Amino acid sequence: DASTGSSNTSLLLAGAGISIARNITVTNNGSGVTTIGSDTGSANNVVFSGTITLQRPTTLISGTGDRTTYTGQITGNVGTLTVAGGNRTALDNLSNNFTGDVVVTGAGTILQTGVGTGAEHLPDTSSVTVQAGAIFKLAGVNTGSTETINALNGAGLVRRHEAVAGQQKLVVGAAGGS
């Protein structure tokens, strides 16, 4: 909202096994950092199942002992979607169509695509930067899955989820990136 000016805004869920099904919109008003996710101390999976529309750079943060999962569609012109928090953030919607790139940052931070559902959880035009100490984890279905992105950068790790069988493929260069 325009009244936030340069102030930071956040929507952080705290508690065990919380789920929020409401749609969330982050407008392009104001210039502060916008953060969505779970607060530290949450023991179990926190789930956002409503559509999240992002119209400016936003950070998804996971402070849970397990993971923060986004089963609702993430859409909009985010510019840069940052994943942080030192824990696991899972994108589990096959219709994510946001415009922008993804940065995974912070020691122990994991961006996981899928939680046993198909492939293609990130837009093909998104470039992904995995910074040192962070992990980009592929976790499609047990029969094998493919995730396609534009470019892959950074000194972090890319790996298959240890509990998911089948070949997990990462295709890079969908929009001319490398």
Image: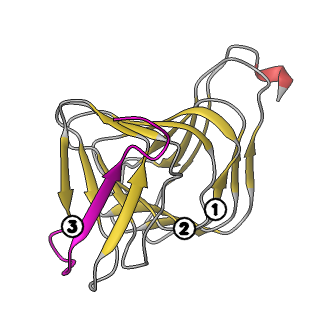
Q: Which of 104 and 47 is in front in this view?
A: 104
Q: Is mark 3 on a helix, strand or loop?
A: loop
Q: Look at the magenta stretch and give its main secondary structure.
A: loop
| Residue 94 position in % (x across, y down) | 55, 68
Q: Which residue is drawn at 20% across and 36% down?
A: 107
Q: Mark 1 points at which residue?
A: 73
Residue reaching furthest right?
Answer: 2
Q: Real-space Cα distance between discs 2 and 1?
A: 6 Å
- Dot 1, how many residues are within 10 Å of its Cα: few (below 14), some (14-19), or many (20+)? many
Q: Name the residue under label 3.
A: 161
| Residue 161 position in % (x across, y down) | 21, 67
Q: Which residue is drawn at 45% across and 72% down?
A: 17
Mark 2 and 1 residues: CB-CB less than 8 Å, in contact? Answer: yes
Quadrant of the frame with the C terminus: top left
Instruction: Determine which of the numbered discs, if any, sits on residue 132 in the image.
Output: none
Kind of residue at badge 2: Asn
Residue 117, image quadrant: bottom left
Q: Mark 2 points at which residue?
A: 93
Mark positioned earlier in the residue sequence (3 or 1): 1
Q: Considering only vertical position in the picture, is 32 above or below 20?
A: above
- Dot 2, how many residues are within 10 Å of its Cα: few (below 14), some (14-19), or many (20+)? many
Kind of residue at badge 3: His
Residue 44, image quadrant: bottom left
Q: Give the range drawn in magenta.
A: 161-178
Q: Real-space Cα distance between discs 3 and 1?
A: 22 Å
Q: Nearer the viewer, residue 144 or 83?
A: 144
Q: Is mark 1 on a helix, strand or loop?
A: loop
Q: Nearer the viewer, residue 169 or 20?
A: 169
Mark positioned earlier in the residue sequence (2 or 3): 2
